[in-house]
Amino acid sequence: MPAKILNLFKKAQRGRWAIGQFNFSNLETLKAIVQAAEKLKSPTIVGTSEGESKFVGLEQAAALVKSYREKTKLPIILNLDHGRSFDYIKKAIDAGYDAVHFDGSGLSLEKNIQETKKVVNYARKHGVLVEGEAGVIGDVGKQKGVLTEPKDALRFVKETKVDSLAVAIGNLHGIEASGINPKLNLKRLKEIKEKIGNIPLVLHGGSGTPEADIKKAIKSGIVKININTELRMAYTNTLKKSFQEKPTEIVSYKYMPLVVEAVQKIVEEKIRLFGSQNKA
Ligand code: G3H
Ligand code: ZN
């Protein structure tokens, strides 16, 4: 599997497109993501944060994804997103995740490198891909970001030997009240790329990022883009609307086709924006 994923990243780098990572915490969202990928023949990464995976269950997430992969014959990769401890990441790997992201952004660079190395060491033995993170990605309303320093990024990838690197370039988790997040620092992205070469770069906080910035970021070396908030908004807002429109309906799955449709629409838009259609 890691060779397969790395090949996809290389293909994306050469073709100047990116693979979307879409997060899920329930069957409806996963179904919507898979349907969009199937319709547009796109390779796809599906992600669960620690919290999302605790709700779904690590083994259950792995089993669901395996089942969809077998049914669709598409490259659907399951990634643990923002794993914060070696112990939890180990559990995800043991449960059958294909890839893991270690988020050591709360640690000093030294400690981040040290912990990431532990993750890489365990993941390698199990054929699992590792995404590392240098710098601090901001969170709307919670945490200010700290841009990735190109020299730190170089040291980080050299010492940890991660397969891909998440960068902080003004990207934000969540969406600003205006609906649009501030511009990406594309100059910094180019400086990082120049310094570290061909390591696949990952953009977190894709929701709300202006389309023009996404396109420029892909041209400057981003090959994986994470989307979560926009899917959560589509899901929740559509479900709330359905409750209002059918106040007496008690058959819960009957609320869901509209929800799946709304989430699928966003995923399709992102796949087209990232240029990953017909690349499976
Ligand atoms: O790791 C997940 C992503 O970075 C999601 O960011 O919620 O802003 O789309 P987002
Ligand atoms: Zn993220």
Image (cartoon, helix red, strand yellow):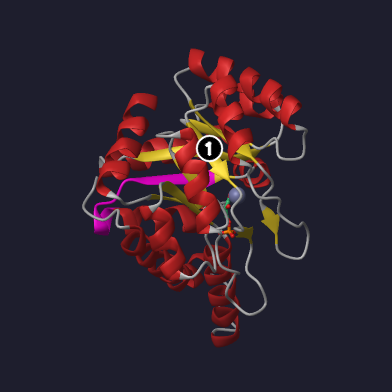
Relative horizontal placement of residue 35, taking residue 226 as reference (left or right): left
Residue at 42% x, 69% y is: 212
Q: Residues within 10 Å of mark 1 (few under 14, many from 20)?
A: many
Type of the residue with mark 1: Leu
Count of numbered marks: 1
Assess whether residue 44 is covered by the magenta stretch. yes
Nearest to the observer: residue 250 or residue 277: 277
Relative horizontal placement of residue 9, taking residue 204 as reference (left or right): left
Residue at 54% x, 80% y is: 242
- Residue 200, position in %: x, y? 43, 38
Q: Is residue 13 above or below residue 185?
A: above
Where on the picture, by quarter, is residue 138?
A: bottom right
Where on the picture, by quarter, is residue 174?
A: bottom right
First to last magenta residue range: 38-47
Q: Is residue 212 above or below residue 133?
A: below
| Residue sitting farthest toward the bottom | 245
- Residue 90, position in %: x, y? 62, 23
| Quadrant in which the N terminus appears | top left
| Quadrant in which the C terminus appears | top left
Assess whether residue 158 is covered by the magenta stretch. no
The answer, for residue 254, to whether it is visible in the render is yes
- Residue 245, position in %: x, y? 54, 87
Where on the picture, by quarter, is residue 159?
A: top right
Residue at 71% x, 64% y is: 140
